[in-house]
Amino acid sequence: MYAILDIETTGGKYNEEGITEIAIHKFDGHQVVDQFISLVNPEKEIQPFVVNLTGITNKMLVTAPKFYEVAKRIVEITEDTVLIAHNAQFDYRILRTEFRRLGFNFERKTICTVELSQKLLPEAESYSLGKLVRSLGIPVSDRHRANGDALATLKLFKLLLSKDLDKTIIKSVMKAETLGELSPRQLDIVDDLPSEVGVFYMHNKDGEIILLNKSNNIKKRVNQYFTNSGNRARRIQKETRSVTFEKTGNELIALLKENEELARNKPKYNPFNKKKLFTFGIYVSLNDHGYLQLKAEKINNTIHQRITTFNSLVAAENFLHAVRDEFQLCNKINGLSQAKTNCSNYDDETCLGACIAKENPESYNIRVTELVKKYSLVEKNIAIVDKGRELGEKSVILIKDGVFTGLGFCDLNYQINNLPILESIITPMTGNANTNHIIETYLRKRKVQKIIDIKE
């Protein structure tokens, strides 16, 4: 559990500042579950330059509660949370100083989004909150007011969580939160999980990830792990101290995150296999008569262009049969018919006669080219847009020069249509033949909201 914090102060000498406004958003990693926003009477004058910066005046604070009047609420909303702030050292110091004046030792674990951004967004030109969120296309209002800056920090932190593929954030938090044996709440941990698509992570007592999986129903899948029998299942049940999750909004994002994070984290109970996820491909080449032929073949180093990939020969040939009907192609040219004259589909008038050279190669090849364009990622520069994790959010998968480069989430269309902003919010991931296989296989079977051509 996190508490996103922002504080505005009077300014002045070190450790003599007073709080003028505070905003705290309690965030469970997926949504805000509580919030506290209040002006605070610091019982001292605000420095003139601070008034100009924040717009908070001494007059506005006359009737505001004093710190001791809101202290209990601050303790309650931040209890058992990790404080998240942009330049957390400052906000945490100010908060501890105020509590120390009341004779209370306020201690919380902290995470600084400046330091996280420097690690996870190394190409950023500036790490000041305003400039950083603007470069990421994150909307922000009421800059230099506690709630405006806290909401901007929350949106930034959500982005950083999605970019943290090594799970260093969640591992450190889970290690701090997981003490001793399973509590009654942890024994009933499935109740806290969503029945939604995403990736879940099982942690041991040290916070380390021992197993991760994607699932269309996280609650159901974790429940299966907790109720299965067998030696491996019992070991997982015994070692699991907590389960965290990330909703992805759709299965394709979950598949790609699972593929990337398995390679990075190598959990002990996930079999890790570096081999290809596919064994057969559809290859296109020009035959002796000038027709583009499609052949289902075992993966090889042929010079012919590979269009897309499959797990088996049966799946590859089934694809050829399906696209034959969709694009009026010829089974004989594609190696699915051994007929000595015309293929049987010519008799049914679903083949236009390429098998007996009745259709000219140019018109036939146009349809094959259309097929390649539809079903292959080769040389494409596109953004695949689909449902996000919550209402109004979109997921985006970026393909450049036919290779998967990463994925992300955004709220606004201009974040998708502006390539520099899109690239800044995308979490870079490893693109290779396996990721192309995952994407192409998914797109053959499922529809996405839209696919946009990307221009440099």
Image (spheres, helix red, strand yellow):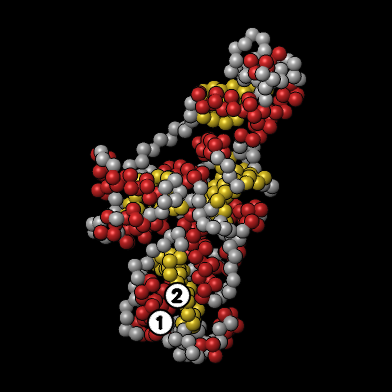
Res 54 quadrant in image: bottom right
Mark 1: give few (<14), some (14-19) or many (20+) Cα within 10 Å.
some
Residue 213, compared with residue 344, is above or below; it is below
Residue at 34% from the left image edge and 50% from the top image edge: 202
Distance, label 1 to label 2, CA atoms, is: 10 Å
- Asked whether 275 or 220 is in front, the reply is 220
Whether residue 365 appears in this view of the structure is yes
Name the quadrant of the N terminus. bottom left
User: In the figure, residue 92 lies in which quadrant?
Assistant: bottom left
Which residue lies at the image location 59% right of the left edge and 27% below the top edge? 322
Q: How many marks?
A: 2
Question: Tag 1: residue type?
Answer: Val
- Pick the front one: 186 or 126: 186
Q: Mark 1 or mark 2, which has the lower sequence index?
A: 2
Q: Which residue carries the number 1 mark? A: 70
Residue type pointed to by label 2: Phe
